[in-house]
């Protein structure tokens, strides 16, 4: 490369990182060729200089809320990927029949609790299918026999030390929904379980269920995303809660129907169930 | 040694995502407000930038730059794309508003990063005409032609000052992994 060509190349690199290049300029730069390390060092320098005299100002509160929700979603995907690396029962399907033998242990408890109801535990669908750099797309994992199932986990949670709150499901705003059940939650464990009877199966390609947690850390307008889930069996369903933020002293829970993958903010047009916490029930 | 936020995101530490937002939210927002005229555009851009930052956290190399500079780089990429797409690069007309903003925002919480101070130091190592060109182009967003019109310098001279100023500032700031023998001095 001649000195003139090198100057031209550097001019174009500087222009690229200060203003961006037109197609024609980009082709010219490609034609000249350049060292990617040189390009990166110039880009970093321009970025550094762009901060000269920059007094950083706090973002508007509404933007902060949106970004916190997005951060929770992204962090949730990281957690999902981590969880899938070490299989845990919270994302597994458990069926009363057709399941693996490991689940028979809880049938006795379940039979005593809900004698005539076919038991099912739903799959917690990993949120979003977008490709995240460095994060493997999670897939359902095989059942390990020695692990407790969600019913046992729910029992363990309720028997654990520390306060566990409970809310019974009541009607939302969707007609013809006859859903009963409850939700239990432990601040200390940051874990909880929803139990449903009569929650219709959903088509995961068209819609999903999503839990919202109304707690003291968030306003009523921005409840915590408690995770999405799909129901693929009839009967009683127990779903682990997957909060995207740390929840503290929840007052109420709501389940909505949303688009596949869930939403950051619900329009609340399809509320399946609502539950207000009654601590004295636990 | 304490691991940085970006490395922790890349390692799959979920809590680091929120930390990243808390630590760099103001920086990204301020860069967006400086480069984009419209605050709605800035809000959209900031959301896109943070997704880019989180997705690209694994590409951060602490030997090449600080986290702040890396995030500013990612932010500028997205902002430049947006400006070019909408052809709404900040103009001289809007400049007065931008320059007036810090005074208007006196009641708000403002901070200056260490990197901002370093950038000023780097600018101060440059010749006055180089510094003027870089302030007008990189900091204030004027095109080379607009700078030529404003300063009376020939367009070619503006470009030369811009290139030499950036390369000299690069040397001062020590960014990137570059063989110093390749650098061009003013």
Image: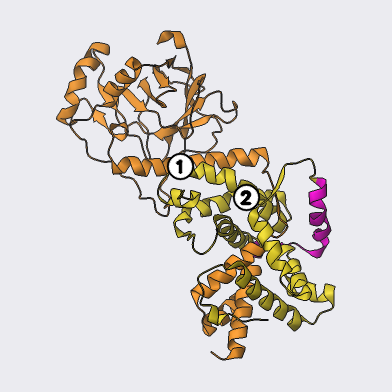
For the C terminus of chain B, give its image quadrant: bottom right
Left or right relative to A250: residue B30: right
How far, Cα to Cα, is label 2 from label 1? Answer: 20 Å
Predominant SS of the magenta segment: helix
Would you name the residue on which mark 2 appears?
B44
Q: Residue at x 71, y 70 (%)?
A: B125
Counting from the top left corner in percent of width and height, residue B25 is at 61, 47
Crowd around label 1: few <14 · some 14–19 · many ≥20 (10 Å): many
Report whether mark 2 lies on the same chain as mark 1. no
Of residues B61 and A71, the one nearer the viewer is B61
Of residues B55 and A129, the one nearer the viewer is B55
Residue A245 image label: none
Q: Is residue A179 visible?
A: no
Q: Residue at x 60, y 58 (%)?
A: B72
Q: Residue at x 53, y 84 (%)?
A: A31
Counting from the top left corner in percent of width and height, residue B26 is at 65, 47
Q: Residue at x 19, y 26 (%)?
A: A103
Crowd around label 2: few <14 · some 14–19 · many ≥20 (10 Å): few
Q: Which chain is orange?
A: A
Of residues B121 and B71, the one nearer the viewer is B121
**In the orientation shown, which residue stands out farthest toward the bottom?**
A2
Q: Which chain is yellow?
A: B
Above or below, A247 against B100 in this view is: above
Residue A75 image label: 1
Left or right relative to A20: residue A173: left
Residue range in magenta is: B84-104
Question: The numbered mark 2 sits on a residue in which chain?
Answer: B
**In the orientation shown, which residue stands out farthest toward the left?**
A101
Counting from the top left corner in percent of width and height, residue B66 is at 55, 58
């Amino acid at each position: 490369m001649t000195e003139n060509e090198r100057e031209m190349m550097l001019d174009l690199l500087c222009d690229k990182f200060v203003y961006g290049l037109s197609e024609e300029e980009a082709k010219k730069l490609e034609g000249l060729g350049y060292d990617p390390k040189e390009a990166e060092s110039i880009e970093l320098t321009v970025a550094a200089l762009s901060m000269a005299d920059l007094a950083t100002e706090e973002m508007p509160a509404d933007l902060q809320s949106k970004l916190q929700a997005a951060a929770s979603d992204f962090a949730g995907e990281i957690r999902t990927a981590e969880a899938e690396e070490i299989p845990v029962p919270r994302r597994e399907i458990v069926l009363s029949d057709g399941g693996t033998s490991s689940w028979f242990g809880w049938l006795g408890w379940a039979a005593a609790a809900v004698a005539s109801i076919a038991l099912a535990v739903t799959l917690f669908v990993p949120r979003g299918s977008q490709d995240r750099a460095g994060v493997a797309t999670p897939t359902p994992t095989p059942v390990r026999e020695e692990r407790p199932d969600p019913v046992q986990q729910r029992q363990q949670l309720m028997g654990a030390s520390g306060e566990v709150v409970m809310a019974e499901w009541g009607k939302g705003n969707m007609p013809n929904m006859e859903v009963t059940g409850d939700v239990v939650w432990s601040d200390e464990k940051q874990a909880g379980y929803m139990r449903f009877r009569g929650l219709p199966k959903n088509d995961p390609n068209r819609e999903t269920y999503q839990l919202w947690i109304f707690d003291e850390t968030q306003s009523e307008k921005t409840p915590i995303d408690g995770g999405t889930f799909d129901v693929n069996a009839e009967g009683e369903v127990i779903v682990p809660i997957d909060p995207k933020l740390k929840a503290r002293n929840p007052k109420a829970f709501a389940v909505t129907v949303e688009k596949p993958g869930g939403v950051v903010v619900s329009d609340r047009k399809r509320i399946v169930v609502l539950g207000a916490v009654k601590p004295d029930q636990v | 040694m304490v691991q940085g936020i970006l490395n922790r995101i890349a390692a799959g530490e979920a809590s680091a995502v929120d930390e990243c937002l808390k630590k760099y939210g103001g920086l990204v927002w301020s860069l967006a407000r400086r480069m984009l005229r419209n605050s709605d555009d800035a809000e959209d851009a900031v959301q896109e930038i943070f997704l880019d930052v989180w997705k690209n956290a694994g590409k951060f190399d602490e030997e090449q730059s600080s986290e702040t500079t890396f995030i500013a780089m990612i932010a500028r990429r997205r902002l430049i794309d947006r400006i070019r797409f909408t052809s709404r690069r900040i103009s001289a007309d809007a400049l007065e508003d931008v320059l007036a903003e810090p005074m208007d925002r006196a009641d708000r919480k403002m901070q200056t990063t260490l990197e901002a101070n370093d950038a000023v130091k780097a600018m101060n190592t440059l010749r006055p005409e180089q510094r003027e060109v870089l302030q007008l182009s990189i900091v204030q967003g004027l095109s080379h032609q607009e700078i030529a019109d404003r300063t009376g310098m020939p367009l070619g001279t503006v470009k030369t000052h811009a290139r030499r100023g950036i390369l000299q500032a690069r040397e001062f700031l020590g960014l990137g992994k570059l063989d110093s023998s390749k650098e061009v001095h003013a």
